[in-house]
Image (tube, grey):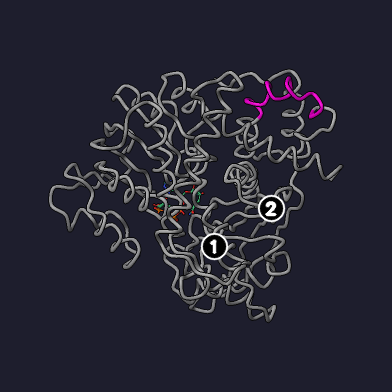
């Protein structure tokens, strides 16, 4: 059920397929953007002649490198790492690093491509990039993580800089990993360049509210979508996939807005607690003790952990996929719609398959795509860069207020752009066109680059 592309866009997509074989996630991400750009080319035919879309689909630079490291027993391991510097029309490349065994070039390119438009939507001066490695951090000791991060940064440092490329965290990369990477960068370059990485610890250049930002931002976006329908999160039941950084803080903010979280998950199964998830217990298990979420059920009577269960079959008003790409398919979307779900927002990047996203839109469910709904994380990273540049440190309240304002603004821009281009209420159209036009205009102004 893939939508047809405009006749000017289909050859561009075929070229992307041909030039990037085997990179299915990248193809999916490009297709999803191109699907919405037909009316833009009709309105601005000059963008066809200047081949802006072809240029945006080709990364400015792609770096692939070897990361050798030694485990605690002395055995040597070789991983592969990537940094795709996709587009710098609006500012230095900005986007996280992902450590997960599934990582390959196609995943990093899909994430980097999405990042271009997401970063444009924030209104901050940041370009788009992404990186990662097929390294699996699960079960590794702190020392092994440190050796891996140091080895990775020993190559990556030469491509970074606060005006060049500024990585952050993503799946498998949190403050511990960023600390090891920052330490190695500082050691090699002999520069305390705070602005070269974001998501840092508070004691060494980090921003308050960065840890919370992606999850909080996603829920601010949901609240705005519901407001546009004269509704709110108050009293709603919410299901959140994952139990990592984004999931935990999406749960926290949804609870602050009066919602009840009844289920979350990890890659092994789902946790259902109809009495309402105890977030302090989740935080202790995941953030302090680094245990599996299944152990929650051992401590909280009345809750249950179902191995390999389907989270989306738990009836809810609002669904927040916050784990990974393509985790919610057409059959899940059908179940959610039948169970009366009214809103879906993507805390993760591209968690809904193309089919699922189209089904939500056809059913008139408020559907917030990741580019818009999870942009709060990178927006707050840009706020961290601002604080680093002015050697300042803002309060939590001030930073969170900026985040809320940014999310309200993103929602308004997407809403208005969707209406302007003939698709009222369609946040996919709104997000893609708003982000695309911002980048395209900047590229156009800078000549053929
Ligand atoms: P974390 O590593 O903190 O958490 C990831 C969570 O998702 C874990 O619960 C993990 O379970 C689960 N998960 C990962 N892979 C899979 C899989 N293949 N199948 C099922 N569950 C899986 O990552 P984040 O919370 O930071 O990131 C989550 C998503 O949000 C990603 O898509 C990321 O790109 C996106 N995102 C993150 C931002 C941020 O600021 N961190 C910003 C914007 C988007 P397990 O522990 O079992 O692996």
In the rendered image, residue 118 lying in the magenta stretch gets the answer: no
Q: Is residue 16 left or right of residue 232?
A: right
Spot occupied by residue 270 in the image (x, y as percentages of width and height): 30, 45
**Label ID, residue 84:** 2
Q: Secondary structure at mark 2?
A: strand
First in residue order: circle 1 vs circle 2: 2
Q: Is residue 2 left or right of residue 398?
A: right
Q: Nearer the viewer, residue 207 or 274?
A: 207
Name which residue lies at 60% across and 22% down: 420
Q: Secondary structure at mark 1?
A: helix
Considering the whole magenta stretch, tell me its main secondary structure.
helix
In this rendering, the answer to whether 61 lies above or below 423 is below
Marks 1, 2: nearer the viewer: 1
**Residue neighbourhood size for the residue with mark 1, other residues' Cα within 10 Å, grouped as few (<14), some (14–19), many (≥20):** many
**Residue neighbourhood size for the residue with mark 2, other residues' Cα within 10 Å, grouped as few (<14), some (14–19), many (≥20):** many
Name which residue lies at 69% across and 35% down: 437
Q: Which residues are magenta?
A: 34-47
Spot occupied by residue 262 in the image (x, y as percentages of width and height): 24, 42
Quarter of the image with the C terminus is top right
Numbered disc total: 2
Task: Give the labeled residue for mark 1.
Answer: 384
């Amino acid at each position: 059920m893939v939508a047809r592309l405009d006749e000017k866009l289909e050859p561009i997509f075929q070229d992307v397929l041909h030039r990037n074989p085997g990179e299915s996630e990248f193809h999916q991400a490009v297709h999803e953007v191109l699907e919405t750009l037909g009316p833009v080319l009709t309105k601005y035919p000059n963008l066809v002649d200047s081949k802006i879309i072809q240029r945006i689909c080709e990364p400015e630079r792609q770096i692939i490198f070897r990361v050798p490291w030694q485990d605690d027993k002395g055995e040597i391991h070789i991983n592969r790492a990537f940094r795709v510097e996709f587009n710098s029309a609006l500012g230095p490349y900005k986007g996280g690093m992902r450590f997960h065994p599934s990582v390959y070039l196609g995943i990093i390119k899909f994430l980097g491509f999405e990042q271009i438009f997401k970063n444009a939507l924030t209104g901050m001066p940041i370009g788009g990039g992404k990186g990662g490695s097929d390294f699996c951090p699960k079960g590794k000791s702190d020392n092994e993580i440190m050796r891996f991060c140091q080895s990775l940064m020993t190559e990556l440092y030469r491509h970074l800089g606060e005006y060049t490329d500024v990585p952050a965290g993503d799946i498998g990369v949190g403050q511990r990993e960023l600390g090891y990477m920052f330490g190695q960068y500082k050691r090699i370059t002999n520069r305390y360049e705070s602005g070269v990485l974001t998501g840092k610890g508070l004691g060494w250049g980090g921003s308050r509210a960065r840890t919370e930002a992606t999850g909080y931002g996603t829920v601010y976006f949901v609240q705005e979508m519901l407001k546009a329908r004269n509704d709110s999160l108050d009293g709603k039941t919410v299901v959140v996939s994952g139990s990592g950084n984004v999931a935990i803080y999406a749960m926290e903010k949804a609870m602050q807005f009066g919602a009840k979280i009844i289920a979350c998950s990890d890659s092994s199964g789902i946790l259902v607690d109809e009495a309402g998830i105890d977030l302090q217990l989740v935080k202790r298990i995941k953030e302090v003790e680094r245990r599996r979420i299944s152990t929650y059920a051992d401590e909280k009577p009345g809750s249950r952990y179902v191995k390999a269960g389907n989270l989306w079959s738990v009836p809810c008003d609002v669904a927040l996929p916050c784990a990974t790409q393509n985790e919610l398919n057409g059959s899940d979307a059908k179940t959610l719609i039948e169970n009366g779900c009214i809103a879906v927002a993507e805390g993760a990047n591209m968690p809904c398959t193309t089919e699922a996203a189209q089904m939500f839109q056809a059913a008139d469910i408020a559907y917030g795509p990741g580019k818009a709904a999870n942009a709060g994380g990178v927006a707050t990273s840009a706020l961290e860069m601002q604080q680093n540049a002015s050697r300042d440190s803002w309060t939590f309240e001030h930073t969170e207020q900026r985040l809320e304002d940014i999310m309200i603004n993103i929602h308004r821009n997407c809403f208005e752009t969707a209406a302007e281009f003939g698709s009222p209420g369609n946040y996919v159209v709104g997000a893609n066109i708003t982000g695309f036009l911002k980048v395209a205009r900047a590229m156009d102004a800078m000549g053929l680059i």
